[in-house]
């Protein structure tokens, strides 16, 4: 037989099976990843049994088949699993590591995530397991407010741990990482301060969100930033809340700085009141501190200083305010009563929240959903709290003030998909018929039969809270109304209102100064959505801010039609 005949024959055979593999091996060895991390074996790992070995039921799989099988398995795996197995890999898969990847994936599948724990950051599980009857629980939004470093995020993290929203392993990981940064007391706040900047500085910037459930109610935690630079974010958080928790630090010196003129304790309590929070719980935190040591005198001292101020803001001390001592770091008096504090006889924090009376909300009112945030994700997604009415899937709605007709593709209430949602729920809606660029925070979703009012000019009653000089017509400030932020000018002062009797002055004032109440005409730079306070309180309250300070709070009395 001619040798030339046999040669192509054997080449073909090689082509069928092993040549491709050889080629792969060769290419992978030429592009070796020199900077790959050294492989640290996990001594406690369970024995590694590859999935294909189980399928074949044979131990003597030859090495070529093993490689081939490994490769096909890797292509079948969804790409995100590859990423998850090695999130810290900086170079696009150098050879041998690339070949080891399917084994790593299979191994992590086989033995829980013992390897993964060391290699990657586990995100905190934020979605509670839902029972079939879960949506019937009443939804309550709780905003945590107070001076910077009073312990808001730490209390939020502790509550999530006590109610089982964050598992122990995740917290231990946070604790390890926090220790490495010499910040071991911060680890609880990391459950809510998720981005790197917030963790490095130990300050909340954006409003963190998390959920927890008690026997009767479903709560959304809104963790507002305490720093004065981020007050606009805090106003956005408070405008979604039904209930505010004012966290104050009992530690010597810290309470005083938070409460003095420049402190955030005062401003936050006032902003919460204007944002429409009816009930306030004051948590006196850091009671376990060495300077306090659960002393009743210090607790009473904080209470005495706060009550007159909260009264001035408009809270009724007997009905609207509830004080309680606690320690966010140790979790004392949050879920279980503590022995350290025998003089406090009330309920701990979480049981107290559970025992609050229900809010009366009308689900048959007009639909009003102020938009807090928006992003692109397989369509346009918006976030907001449904203030009134109820929304269901596939419903046609109108986006005001631009009058875009949109359709609801899907509804998520606290990250759990539902078919319909009632008032008071925090929703994510996926919309059809509008681009993400066409939406701004402060826009409002309404039903076509009952649109909300929009305009630029309105009359409002304003209380000047803090302003050094006088305010005259022509004064510019920033208006925060529901979730909308817009520049505004006071175009005219109509009259002064007497604080005690409520009488209006006959003559027009030429200016107003601190602590006065007046009725003024305001004009915004652009068209905004708003309602009168009488018709719809949530969309008729506002704050005016300037130079990073809250100057005035007010309510919309009437909308003025535009003159063309």
Image (cartoon, helix red, strand yellow):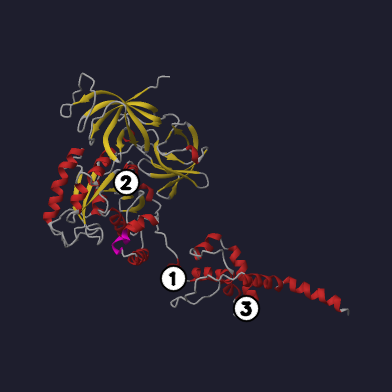
Q: Is residue 27 left or right of residue 444?
A: right
Which circle marks residue 527 in the picture?
A: none
Marks 1/2: CA–CA distance:
41 Å
Examine the image and state in which quarter residue 465 appears.
top left
In the image as oriented, which residue stretches furthest toward the right?
A: 1
Q: Which residues are magenta?
A: 183-188
Q: Position of residue 322 (x, y in %)?
A: 19, 47
Helix, strand or loop at disc 2? helix
Q: Is residue 403 left or right of residue 273?
A: right
Q: Position of residue 370 (x, y in %)?
A: 39, 38
Q: Which residue carries the number 1 mark?
A: 114
Task: Tell me the residue at 17%/29% (across/down).
Answer: 499
Examine the image and state in which quarter residue 533 appears.
top left
Helix, strand or loop at disc 1? helix
* SS majority, magenta: helix
Q: Nearer the viewer, mark 1 or mark 3?
A: 1
Marks 2/3: CA–CA distance:
64 Å
Q: Is residue 364 visible?
A: no
Which circle marks residue 61 in the picture?
A: 3
Q: Which residue carries the number 2 mark?
A: 229
Q: Position of residue 416 (x, y in %)?
A: 43, 50
Residue 432 drawn above or below residue 507 = below
Residue 273 drawn above or below residue 174 = above
């Amino acid at each position: 037989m001619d040798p030339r005949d046999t040669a192509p024959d054997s080449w073909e055979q090689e082509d069928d099976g092993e040549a491709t593999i050889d080629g792969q091996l060769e290419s992978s060895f030429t592009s070796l990843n020199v900077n790959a991390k050294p492989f640290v074996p996990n001594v406690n790992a369970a024995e590694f049994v590859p999935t294909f070995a189980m399928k074949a039921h044979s131990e003597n799989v030859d090495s070529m088949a093993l490689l081939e099988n490994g490769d096909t398995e890797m292509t079948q795996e969804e790409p995100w699993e590859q990423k998850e197995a090695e999130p810290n890999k900086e170079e696009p898969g150098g050879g041998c590591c690339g070949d080891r990847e399917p084994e790593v994936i299979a191994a992590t599948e086989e033995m829980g995530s013992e390897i993964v724990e060391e290699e990657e950051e586990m995100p905190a599980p934020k979605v509670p397991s839902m029972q079939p009857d879960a949506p019937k629980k009443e939804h309550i939004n709780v905003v945590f407010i107070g001076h910077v470093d009073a312990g808001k995020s730490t209390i939020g993290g502790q509550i999530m741990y006590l109610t089982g929203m964050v598992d122990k392993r995740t917290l231990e990981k946070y604790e390890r990482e926090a220790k490495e940064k010499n910040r071991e007391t911060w680890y609880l706040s990391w459950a809510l301060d998720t981005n790197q900047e917030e963790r490095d500085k130990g300050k909340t910037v954006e409003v963190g969100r998390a959920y927890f459930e008690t026997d009767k109610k479903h709560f959304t935690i809104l963790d507002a930033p305490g720093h004065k630079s981020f007050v606009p974010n805090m106003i956005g958080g408070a405008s979604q809340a039904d209930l505010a928790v004012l966290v104050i630090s009992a530690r010597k010196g810290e309470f005083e700085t938070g409460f003095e003129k420049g402190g955030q304790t005062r401003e936050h309590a006032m902003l919460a009141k204007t944002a429409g929070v009816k009930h306030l719980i004051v948590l006196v935190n850091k009671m376990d501190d060495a300077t306090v040591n659960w002393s009743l005198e210090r607790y009473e001292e904080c209470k005495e200083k706060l009550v007159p101020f909260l009264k001035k803001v408009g809270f009724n001390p007997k009905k609207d305010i509830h004080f309680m001592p606690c320690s966010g770091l140790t979790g004392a008096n949050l879920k279980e009563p503590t022995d350290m504090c025998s003089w406090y006889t009330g309920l701990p924090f979480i049981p107290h929240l559970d025992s609050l009376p229900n809010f009366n909300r009308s689900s048959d009112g007009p639909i009003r959903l102020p938009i807090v945030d928006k992003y692109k994700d397989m369509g346009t997604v918006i976030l907001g709290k449904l203030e009134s009415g109820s929304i269901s899937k596939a419903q046609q709605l109108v986006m005001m003030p631009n009058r875009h007709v949109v359709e609801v593709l899907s509804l998520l209430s606290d990250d759990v998909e539902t078919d319909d949602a009632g008032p008071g729920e925090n929703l994510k809606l996926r919309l059809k018929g509008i681009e993400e660029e066409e939406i701004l925070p402060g826009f409002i979703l309404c039903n076509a039969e009952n649109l909300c009012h929009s305009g630029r000019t309105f009359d409002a009653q304003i209380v000047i809270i803090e302003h050094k000089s006088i305010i005259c017509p022509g004064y510019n400030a920033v208006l925060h109304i529901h979730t909308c932020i817009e520049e505004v000018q006071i175009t005219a002062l109509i009259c002064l209102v007497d604080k005690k009797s409520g009488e209006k002055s006959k003559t027009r004032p030429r200016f107003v100064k601190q602590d006065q109440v007046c009725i003024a005409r305001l004009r915004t730079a652009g068209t905004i959505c708003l309602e009168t306070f009488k018709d719809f309180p949530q969309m008729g309250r506002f704050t005016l801010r300037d130079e990073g300070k809250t100057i005035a709070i007010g309510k919309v009395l009437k909308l003025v039609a535009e003159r063309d």
